[in-house]
Structure formats: structure tokens, C-alpha cells
Image (cartoon, grey):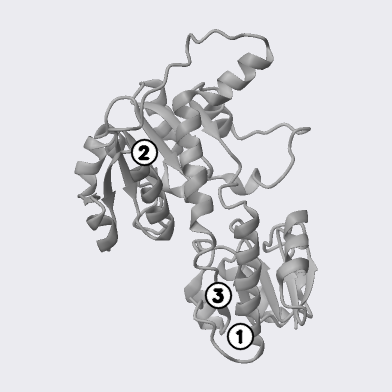
């Protein structure tokens, strides 16, 4: 079976060659899939796509016309796929529901520690032979309160790490995790979580209900100087509202591994180009903002699991079976 892999970076190609089933034939395209290049899929039975590929109805219709029968997502999120259109067209869609949740959880905590102890600033100072501590004051995580929005596998992995720091944990999810409750975590309504948390970390999927979950109203309910971390999906945050909150000092620390308009930026080397996204450039001007380019998932273990589960999903389609990861 021939599979067209879009948004394929060098590490994707190396990973699939190392860990995917050898009976599958992959062709790699370094561009994201969209309406303008969907014709490249002619002669392929499946496409393999990532978080910023366009799987809107018009693209899906073109894929169907080219003979594609399956969409293999090499990620957990599927907000970029028109599932209703896929079902109508008879296109199977499968994802990787979990790939090393510890990878994202550990990156989340790394961002918390970096922002709190200002490690990025300290690193640059020492390289300039500046050993002064002024401006590097942090706070103990022990005894502070963290609020986690979403307690799926990544949220649970994050909670376990933060409990190890001796933090108080508040959570919100439509489903309560009994093991976390036994460990001392409390589930609260969002309004109470906003008001009581020193650190708020987002671990929920992007849906119509969670779009711009962080907005003017929710930010107004948070503590002054709150730390906000997002390693989930950029659309959970109203970026312009967050910029206002940074200017007013409502947000004291902001860590982002995702950005609402990241499709035009992330996973590319744009160092020699002019970036005309004024909102993103404004974020970069704040000294208390830390941004990474959607790398929280990026560990050897996660890449291996992504390739292996994606391979299993494709083989199930090839043999007219179900892998259990279909949407």
C-alpha cells in the first residue's frame, strides 16, 4: 500500500524508516497538505498527516477523487479534520490516541521551572560573564496550587509530576479520574479553579466548546501574576486577550508550546525571513513569555510510538480490519 506523508520533516522520514512496518510504502512531502497540493495524492491509497495539515471538506473531496481511502493522523488531536465530511465521503480516519504522555507532561513542567527560576535569562547572563542574581528571583513550587484543565493521559502524567513537588492540585474535566482523587487531587468547577490556582496548565482537546477557553472573562477570574502554560492546542487561548493580561500584569508568566496561528510558522526555519504575524511578534517582546515551537511531543520514545501505532492503523485499513483508533 502506498502512503503519502505530508509535513514530513527529516526526523519523520528517519522514524518511519526505522519503526514502521516494511510492507508499507511511504512517500514523503515536506509541505503541509492543503487544497492546492491535494492532487499530489493521486495513486496513493492513504495519506499520513500531522497537526497543521488541512483536512477540510474541500481537501477531503479532492483526496477522495484521487483515490485515497484513509487519513492516518500521526497525532492525538483531530480538530483539523472535518469528520462529518470524511464519514460522508467514506474516508476512514484513524489517530494515535496516546504517544508517550510523559513527553508532553515533562515539557510542561520544564516550562514551569524555566519561567519560574528564569533559567533562560540566567543562561544568557552567565555566558556574558554576568553572575548577578537581581531579576532572577523565583518561588517554591512546594505548597503552591496548580490547576490542570483536562485529566486525560497527559494531564494525569503532569499531575503525578507536580504532586511530587508537593503542590496542591485542582483539576477540571468532564470525567473524574478516581486514582487522582485518591492521590489528593480535587476536582472543581472552572470558576473556582481559575480563582484558586497559582499555575494553570491546559491539557484538553480543542473543540467548539473549548475554543478560546482562556479569554477576557476567564482571565479576569484568575489570581494576579498567575502562570499560564499551554502545551495542548493554540486555539484554547484567545491570544489578544492574553496580551492584554500580560500588559496589565494579570499574567505573570506565560509558557506556550502551541499558538493559534502556528500553521504558518512552526516546524520551519524562518530565521532568514520577515515574520509578518504582529500578534506573535508582540508576544515575543514580553520578558516573562517563553515560547517553544510545538516540541513538547518531541522525544525518541514518542516518535517511535507514533510510527508504530500509525503503522498499525494503516495495516488495519490495508487488511480491512479495525485498529481501535478510528474516529
Q: Nearer the viewer, residue 121 or 60?
A: 121
Any part of residue 174 in sight: no
Q: Which mark is residue 316?
A: 1
CB-based contact (under 8 Å), mark 3 and mark 1: yes
Q: Nearer the viewer, residue 124 or 33?
A: 124
Indicate the secondary structure of the residue bearing disc 1. Answer: helix
Where in the figure is residue 73, as x and y percent of width and height? 59, 68
**Vertical order, 109 against 247 (above or below):** below
Q: CA distance from mark 2 to mark 3?
A: 37 Å
Q: CA distance from mark 1 to mark 2?
A: 42 Å
**Vertical order, 234 against 86 (above or below):** above
User: What residue is drawn where x is 63% and y is 69%?
Assistant: 59
Q: Nearer the viewer, residue 106 or 44?
A: 106
Indicate the secondary structure of the residue bearing disc 3. Answer: strand
- Rate crowding at label 2 as few (under 14), some (14 to 19) or many (20 or more) other CA atoms within 10 Å: few
Of the residues under marks 2 and 3, which one precedes in the sequence?
Answer: 3
Indicate the secondary structure of the residue bearing disc 2. Answer: loop
Where in the figure is residue 119, as x and y percent of width and height? 54, 25
Left or right, 286 with respect to 267, comes to left
- Rate crowding at label 3 as few (under 14), some (14 to 19) or many (20 or more) other CA atoms within 10 Å: many
Q: Which mark is residue 165?
A: 2
Where in the figure is residue 110, as x and y percent of width and height? 50, 38
Q: Which mark is residue 149?
A: none
User: What residue is drawn where x is 68% and y is 80%?
Assistant: 68
Of the residues under marks 3 and 1, which one precedes in the sequence?
Answer: 3
Which residue, given by chain and number where applicable, does mark 3 sit on?
Answer: 94
Amino acid at each position: 500500500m502506498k502512503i503519502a506523508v505530508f509535513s514530513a520533516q527529516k526526523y519523520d522520514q528517519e522514524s518511519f524508516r526505522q519503526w514502521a512496518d516494511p510492507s508499507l510504502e511511504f512517500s514523503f512531502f515536506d509541505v503541509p497538505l492543503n487544497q492546492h497540493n491535494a492532487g499530489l495524492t493521486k495513486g496513493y491509497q492513504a495519506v499520513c498527516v500531522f497537526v497543521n495539515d488541512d483536512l477540510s471538506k474541500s481537501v477531503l473531496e479532492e483526496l477522495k477523487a484521487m483515490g485515497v481511502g484513509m487519513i492516518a493522523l500521526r497525532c492525538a488531536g483531530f480538530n483539523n479534520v472535518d469528520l462529518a465530511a470524511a464519514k460522508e465521503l467514506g474516508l476512514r480516519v484513524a489517530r494515535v490516541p496516546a504517544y508517550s504522555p510523559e513527553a508532553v507532561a515533562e515539557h510542561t513542567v520544564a516550562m514551569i521551572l524555566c519561567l519560574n527560576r528564569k533559567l533562560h535569562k540566567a543562561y544568557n547572563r552567565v555566558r556574558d560573564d554576568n553572575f548577578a542574581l537581581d531579576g532572577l528571583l523565583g518561588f517554591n513550587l512546594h505548597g503552591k496550587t496548580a490547576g490542570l484543565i483536562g485529566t486525560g493521559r497527559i494531564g494525569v502524567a503532569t499531575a503525578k509530576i507536580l504532586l511530587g513537588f508537593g503542590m496542591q492540585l485542582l483539576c477540571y474535566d468532564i470525567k473524574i479520574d478516581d486514582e487522582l482523587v485518591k492521590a489528593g487531587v480535587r476536582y472543581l468547577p472552572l470558576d473556582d479553579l481559575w480563582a484558586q490556582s497559582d499555575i494553570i496548565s491546559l491539557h484538553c482537546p480543542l473543540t467548539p466548546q473549548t475554543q478560546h477557553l482562556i479569554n477576557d472573562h476567564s482571565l479576569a477570574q484568575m489570581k494576579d501574576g498567575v502562570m499560564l502554560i499551554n502545551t495542548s492546542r493554540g486555539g484554547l487561548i484567545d491570544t489578544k486577550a492574553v496580551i492584554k493580561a500580560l500588559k496589565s500584569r494579570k499574567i505573570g508568566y506565560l509558557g506556550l508550546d502551541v499558538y493559534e496561528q502556528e500553521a504558518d510558522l512552526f516546524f520551519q526555519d524562518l530565521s532568514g525571513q520577515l515574520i509578518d504575524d504582529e500578534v506573535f511578534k508582540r508576544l515575543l517582546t514580553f520578558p516573562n513569555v517563553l515560547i517553544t515551537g510545538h516540541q513538547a511531543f518531541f522525544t525518541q520514545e514518542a516518535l517511535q510510538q507514533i510510527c508504530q501505532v500509525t503503522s498499525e492503523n494503516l495495516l488495519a485499513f490495508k487488511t480491512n480490519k479495525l485498529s481501535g483508533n478510528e474516529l
